């Protein structure tokens, strides 16, 4: 008990106002960056925008969540990317989506020859965008493929941020319920499954479910009537795909609890280069670098035994486009939305997700770590380099222990390392500044420089 009191006295004896500010800044900057979306939503500073390209600025995130022995790998997902660098120009044009529907029909029937476990098309098809003739082949292909293979398409929905022109009172209802408005798509038939495209504002988190208002209901009712309605919760495209591939993956206690409590977990990410990716035109034509080939007339019948199609067997095949309107700034760089969706599906099937830790627990642990930092800097006030070395070594040990228990064993994501590192740098700089002031000679005619006992460094106990 006496040792604990002695340590406590050592810690509190060095707590000047300046040092308290160092610890507050060390805690505030990383936490505000890591929880920017929660803070903004709590104070209602910005409209909720789940699918925006806002991401955390904490550069250590991807390193932290992939530090353990279990590295992310693409076990389940294969990506087919429609990209302007590899596909014909008329197919990749974002101004003429109807021209792509025949191509998508051909691609879908070709991919089905590979016998994948699930096909996910990261696109939605509004019913009024194209003529019936322009949609006929796509609808026939979807009907034929979905009759023998699980097929998931995106729902066409809009969030609060995309509906700024409507009644502000209705927007407040969407904000309060964290809901989206779902619109009709082409009537593809009963075998097709649908998933929501909406992402979290913090795209490190896997979107699981969102409350949904049907568009006709949302447009017909006024805000007071909408408040009384509990919108139906629907699966995102990642959850819909995971359910079809392996229903048991979502029946485990952890993920069931997260879905039930509407908590979206964190995950680590595969970079685009780490996900096996295929060119649509190469698959259709059965040859490499087929961009300049007329896929309508010059391509041979696809061979189900080709190496590329065999690689799709028993996988979740995600088809999407690298479109300029769907680029997201993430912890692994700027990537297309379809790459995010592929990552979310892979994470759910690989059980590679982390529960968000309670922010008050994070703060409490950080404060206890600050006490360790302050103990060494108070004990070695005249020897800042020794304080720096000992406090750094102690925090490395504490961080490894906490990482092993919280992240690896219990599956929680905790923000601890950046605040502690900033605190050590701040306290070391503080001691070096004090040492410089003690050595600096006074200029004639000027008052002496203040020391730790001066007014500019008031101790907390005197406040």
Image (cartoon, rainbow, N blue to C red):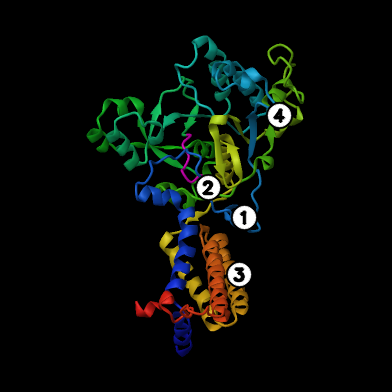
Dot 3 falls on a residue whose secondary structure is helix
- Residue 103 sits above or below residue 48 on the image: above
Which of the marked residues, 3 or 2, is nearer the chain's N terminus? 2
- Residue 292 sits above or below residue 342 on the image: above
Badge 3 density bin: few <14, some 14–19, many ≥20, Cα 10 Å? some
Residue at the far bottom in the pictured view? 2
Q: Nearer the viewer, mark 4 or mark 1?
A: 1
Which of the marked residues, 3 or 1, is nearer the chain's N terminus? 1
Which of the marked residues, 2 or 1, is nearer the chain's N terminus? 1
Which of the marked residues, 2 or 4, is nearer the chain's N terminus? 2
Q: Is residue 102 visible?
A: yes
- Asked whether 416 or 433 is in front, the reply is 433
Q: Which residue is mark 3?
A: 396
Quadrant location, the C terminus: bottom left
Whether pointer 3 and pointer 2 mark residues with C-beta atoms closer than 8 Å, the reply is no
**Part of the protein shown in magenta:** 197-204
Dot 2 falls on a residue whose secondary structure is loop
Residue 199 lies, in percent from the top left, at 48, 39
Whether pointer 2 and pointer 4 mark residues with C-beta atoms closer than 8 Å, the reply is no
Give me the disc on residue 204.
Answer: 2
Badge 1 density bin: few <14, some 14–19, many ≥20, Cα 10 Å? few
Mark 2 vs mark 4, CA separation in Å: 31 Å
Q: Which residue is mark 1?
A: 63
Whether pointer 2 and pointer 1 mark residues with C-beta atoms closer than 8 Å, the reply is no
Q: Is residue 261 visible?
A: no
Relative side of 388 to 221, left or right: right
Mark 3 vs mark 4, CA separation in Å: 48 Å
Mark 4 vs mark 1, CA separation in Å: 34 Å
Give me the disc on residue 309.
Answer: 4
Badge 2 density bin: few <14, some 14–19, many ≥20, Cα 10 Å? many
């Amino acid at each position: 008990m006496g040792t604990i009191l002695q340590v406590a006295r050592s810690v509190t004896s060095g707590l000047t106002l300046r040092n308290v500010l160092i610890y507050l800044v060390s805690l505030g900057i990383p936490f505000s960056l890591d929880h920017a979306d929660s803070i903004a939503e709590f104070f209602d500073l910005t409209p909720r925008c789940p699918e925006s390209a806002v991401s955390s600025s904490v550069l250590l995130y991807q390193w932290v969540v992939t530090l353990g022995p279990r590295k992310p790998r693409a076990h389940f997902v294969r990506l087919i990317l429609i990209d302007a660098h590899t596909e014909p120009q008329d197919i990749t044009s974002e101004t003429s989506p109807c021209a792509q529907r025949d191509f998508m029909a051909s691609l879908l029937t070709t991919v089905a020859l590979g016998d994948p476990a699930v096909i996910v098309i990261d696109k939605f098809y509004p019913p009024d965008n194209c003529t019936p003739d322009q949609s006929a082949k796509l609808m026939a292909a979807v009907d034929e493929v979905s009759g023998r293979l699980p097929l998931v398409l995106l729902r066409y929905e809009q969030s609060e941020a995309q509906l700024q022109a409507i009644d502000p009172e209705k927007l407040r209802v969407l904000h309060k319920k964290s809901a989206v408005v779902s619109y009709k798509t082409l009537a593809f038939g009963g075998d097709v499954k649908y998933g929501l495209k909406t992402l979290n504002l913090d795209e490190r988190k896997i979107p699981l479910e969102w409350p949904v208002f049907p568009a006709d209901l949302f447009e017909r009712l006024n805000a007071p009537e909408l408040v009384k309605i509990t919108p139906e919760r629907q699966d995102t495209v990642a959850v819909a795909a995971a359910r079809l591939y392996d229903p048991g993956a979502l029946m485990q206690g952890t993920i069931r609890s997260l879905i039930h409590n509407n908590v979206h977990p964190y995950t680590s990410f595969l970079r685009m280069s780490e996900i096996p990716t295929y060119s649509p035109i190469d698959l259709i034509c059965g040859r490499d670098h087929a961009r300049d080939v007329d896929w309508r007339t010059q391509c041979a019948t696809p061979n189900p035994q080709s190496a590329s199609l065999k690689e799709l067997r028993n996988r979740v095949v995600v088809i999407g486009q690298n479109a300029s309107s769907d680029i997201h700034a993430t912890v692994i760089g700027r990537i297309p939305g379809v790459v995010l969706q592929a990552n979310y599906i892979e994470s759910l099937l690989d059980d590679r997700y982390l529960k968000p830790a309670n922010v008050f627990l994070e703060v409490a642990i950080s404060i206890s770590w600050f006490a360790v930092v302050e103990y060494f800097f108070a004990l070695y006030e005249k020897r800042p380099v020794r304080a720096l070395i000992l406090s750094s070594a102690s925090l490395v040990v504490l961080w490894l222990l906490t990482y092993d228990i919280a992240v690896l064993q219990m599956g929680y994501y905790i923000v601890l390392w950046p605040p502690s590192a900033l605190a050590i740098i701040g306290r070391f700089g503080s001691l070096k500044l004090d040492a410089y002031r003690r050595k600096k000679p006074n200029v004639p005619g000027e008052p002496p420089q203040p020391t730790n006992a001066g007014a500019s460094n008031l101790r907390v106990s005197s406040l």
